[in-house]
Image: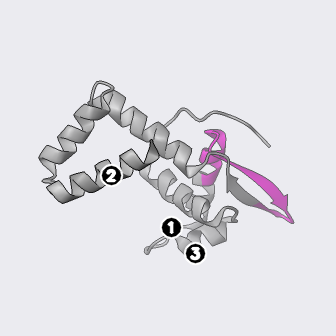
């Protein structure tokens, strides 16, 4: 099994396929397509994207007969953390406080929702 630390962000199409792989844990191209929303992409399209994900270090495969069974190398939570940190670094000068403040102001979060989030955060301590 290849161990690579992915440093690239996923495109929208790549992320859609990763979401399916994270859900299924292991799948061939047909199984991935079955879980994608309509209109279904072509088999060759999905196969190409999966190979790109492999080259980026997000997935690996095991041989099964004439085909491949793909599985994620990177856990969903690890990618989420990486993406969130990138968002904070690129748009909020590395400040989670600035990011939360932005979302509270721009998305009209209610006081109840904000208190609920704070309670959840305090439970982790």
Q: Quadrant of the C terminus?
A: top left
Quarter where residue 116 is shown: bottom left
Distance of mark 2 from mark 1, alpha carbons? 42 Å
33 lies left or right of 91: right
Q: Is residue 4 above or below residue 31?
A: above
Image quadrant holding the N terminus, namely top right
- Do the CB atoms of the residues marked 2 and 1 lie less than 8 Å apart? no
Residue 81 appearing in the image: yes
Residue ID for mark 2: 119
Q: Secondary structure at mark 1?
A: loop
- State the image coordinates of residue 29 (x, y, percent, origin top left): 65, 65
Residue name at image x 68 percent, y 34 percent = 4
Which element type, helix, strand or loop, lies under badge 3? helix
Residue 111, percent across and down? 15, 54
From which residue to which does the magenta span run? 50-68
Q: Is residue 10 visible?
A: no
For marks 3 and 1 on the same chain, the one whose residue lies earlier in the sequence: 3
**Which residue is under mark 3?**
34
Q: Residues within 10 Å of mark 2 (few under 14, many from 20)?
A: few
Of marks 2 and 1, the one in the foreground: 2
Q: Earlier in the sequence, mark 2 or mark 1?
A: 1
Question: Residue placed at 43% from the left, 73% from the top?
Answer: 39
Tag 2, which secondary structure? helix
Residue 37: x and y, percent? 45, 72
Q: What residue is shown with label 1?
A: 41
Position of 93 with respect to 39 (left or right) is: left
Query: What's the distance in space between the residues labelled 3 and 1, CA to CA?
Result: 10 Å
* 2 or 3: tag closer to the N-terminus: 3
Tags 3 and 1 touching, CB below 8 Å:
no
């Amino acid at each position: 099994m290849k161990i690579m630390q992915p440093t690239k962000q996923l495109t929208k199409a790549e992320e859609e396929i990763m979401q399916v792989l994270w859900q299924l844990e292991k799948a061939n191209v047909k199984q991935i397509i079955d879980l994608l929303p309509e209109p279904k992409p072509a088999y060759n399209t999905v196969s190409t994207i999966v190979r790109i994900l492999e080259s980026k270090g997000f997935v690996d495969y095991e041989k099964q007969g004439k085909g491949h069974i793909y599985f994620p190398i990177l856990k969903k939570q690890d990618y989420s953390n990486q993406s969130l940190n990138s968002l904070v670094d690129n748009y909020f000068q590395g400040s989670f406080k600035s990011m939360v403040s932005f979302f509270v102001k721009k998305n009209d979060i209610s006081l109840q929702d904000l208190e609920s989030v704070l309670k959840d955060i305090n439970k982790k301590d």
